Image (spheres, rainbow, N blue to C red):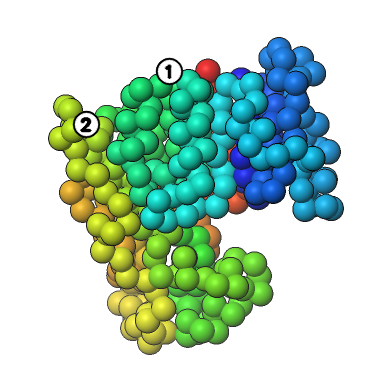
């Protein structure tokens, strides 16, 4: 497959670096201000792609990927658009417009950007229905964890709920608070020093990131379980009940430990509700993953409870989910 990668952060760069190992060729790369476009001829290895190492090096050294305009990447001759720009809320722009451009050209789209899937799922499905291209978005939920594809394989109508620990930053903070008996502010500072938390950690610690992932799962369950998409309920972030971890005191974790329990930020999605909040779990239970690990639990009508854990973020990890989706389109 010939890939156009829009977004040159850690995820986009990892896709560029790893695509060749999966038998694909990157023919265009764009960041917010520049692009580089190959001639797009032939298939993988034909010489029509861009030089992955040169793109990554130039981005690191000069802050741009090439001398072309970003719009040139969207107009390139590719099979799959990889949309890896930062997540935006509300209208989900510019990511949604990137997706629309590709689908209107009958190209496939693979998303790492949560915005279009969490905030405009119905619009996304309508565009896909009118296109010869398909839309995949495994990478929007749980990094390398195959949450979406597992739900699809089981069939959404046979899944009653999906829950789990879906944000590594929040989980790292809660794990350290419990292990060291420290308060939130102290551990947050430590997480920022280690690069686990952003300078502005709101998206993670307030539960927004986990909520977006659960909204996406709720949409998969709702639309996938409906006989007619017109009958499905569409979820956005506004439909989610969200509580973060800022107000979890260290004393609660210490008391919980005395009872063999701990606290984790748990998100849960069904075809009717989305909830994210700190919850007490057994300290040796399945949901008590530590550090930056994530876990997804899938409740099914016939196969019981399935648990999938792994790295929920990171460039190579998320790129592996993207390239897995590309393989499903092949």
Query: Which of the two residues, 175 or 5, is positioned nearer the viewer here?
Result: 5
To which residue does mark 2 refer?
Answer: 229
Q: Quadrant of the N terminus?
A: top right
Q: Is residue 299 visible?
A: no
- The reply to whether the C-beta atoms of the residues labelled 2 and 1 are less than 8 Å apart is no
Tell me which corner region of the image, top left, top right, bottom left or bottom right, holds residue 174.
bottom left
Counting every numbered tag in the picture gives: 2
SS type, badge 2: helix
Whether 42 is drawn above or below 286: the answer is above
Which of the 4 image quadrants contains residue 248? bottom left
Q: Position of residue 23 (x, y in %)?
A: 66, 21
Q: CA distance from mark 2 to mark 1?
A: 18 Å
Helix, strand or loop status at disc 1: loop
Q: Which residue does the image show at 16% across and 27% down from the upper left?
A: 227
- Name which quarter of the figure residue 4 lies in: top right
Percent across and percent down for residue 18 are 69, 34
Residue 314 in sight here: yes
* Residues packed near mark 1 inside 10 Å, few (<14), some (14 to 19) or many (20 plus): few
| Above or below, comparing residue 330 to residue 63 in the picture | above
Q: Earlier in the sequence, mark 2 or mark 1?
A: 1
Q: Which residue is mark 1?
A: 132
In this view of the protein, which residue sits in the foreground, 326 or 144?
326
């Amino acid at each position: 497959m010939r890939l156009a990668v829009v977004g040159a952060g850690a995820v986009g760069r990892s896709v560029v670096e790893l695509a060749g190992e999966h038998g694909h060729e990157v023919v265009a790369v764009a960041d917010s201000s520049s692009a580089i476009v190959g001639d797009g001829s032939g298939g993988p290895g034909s010489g029509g792609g861009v030089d992955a190492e040169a793109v990554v090096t130039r981005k690191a050294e000069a802050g741009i990927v090439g001398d072309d305009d970003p719009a040139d990447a969207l107009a390139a001759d590719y099979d799959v658009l990889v949309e890896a720009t930062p997540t935006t809320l509300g209208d989900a722009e510019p990511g949604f417009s990137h997706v629309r451009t590709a689908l209107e050209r009958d190209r496939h789209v693979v998303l790492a950007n949560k915005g279009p899937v969490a905030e405009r799922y119905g619009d996304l499905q309508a565009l896909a229905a009118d296109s010869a291209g398909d839309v995949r978005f495994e990478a929007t939920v749980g990094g390398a964890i195959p949450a979406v594809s597992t739900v699809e394989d089981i069939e959404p109508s046979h899944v009653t709920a999906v829950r789990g620990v879906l944000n590594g930053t929040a989980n790292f903070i809660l794990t350290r608070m419990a292990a060291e008996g420290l308060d939130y502010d102290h551990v947050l500072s430590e997480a920022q020093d280690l690069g686990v938390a952003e300078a502005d950690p709101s998206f993670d610690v307030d539960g927004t990131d986990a909520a977006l992932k659960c909204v996406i799962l709720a949409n998969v369950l709702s639309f996938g379980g409906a006989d007619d998409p017109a009958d499905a309920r569409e979820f956005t972030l506004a439909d989610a009940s969200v509580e973060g971890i800022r107000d979890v005191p260290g004393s609660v974790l210490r008391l919980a430990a005395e009872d063999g329990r701990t606290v984790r930020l748990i998100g849960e999605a069904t075809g009717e509700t989305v909830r994210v909040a700190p919850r007490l779990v057994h300290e040796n239970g399945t949901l008590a993953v530590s550090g930056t690990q994530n876990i997804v639990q899938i409740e099914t009508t016939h196969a019981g409870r399935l648990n999938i854990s792994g790295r929920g973020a990171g460039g190579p990890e998320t790129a592996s989910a993207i390239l897995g989706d590309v393989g499903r389109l092949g």
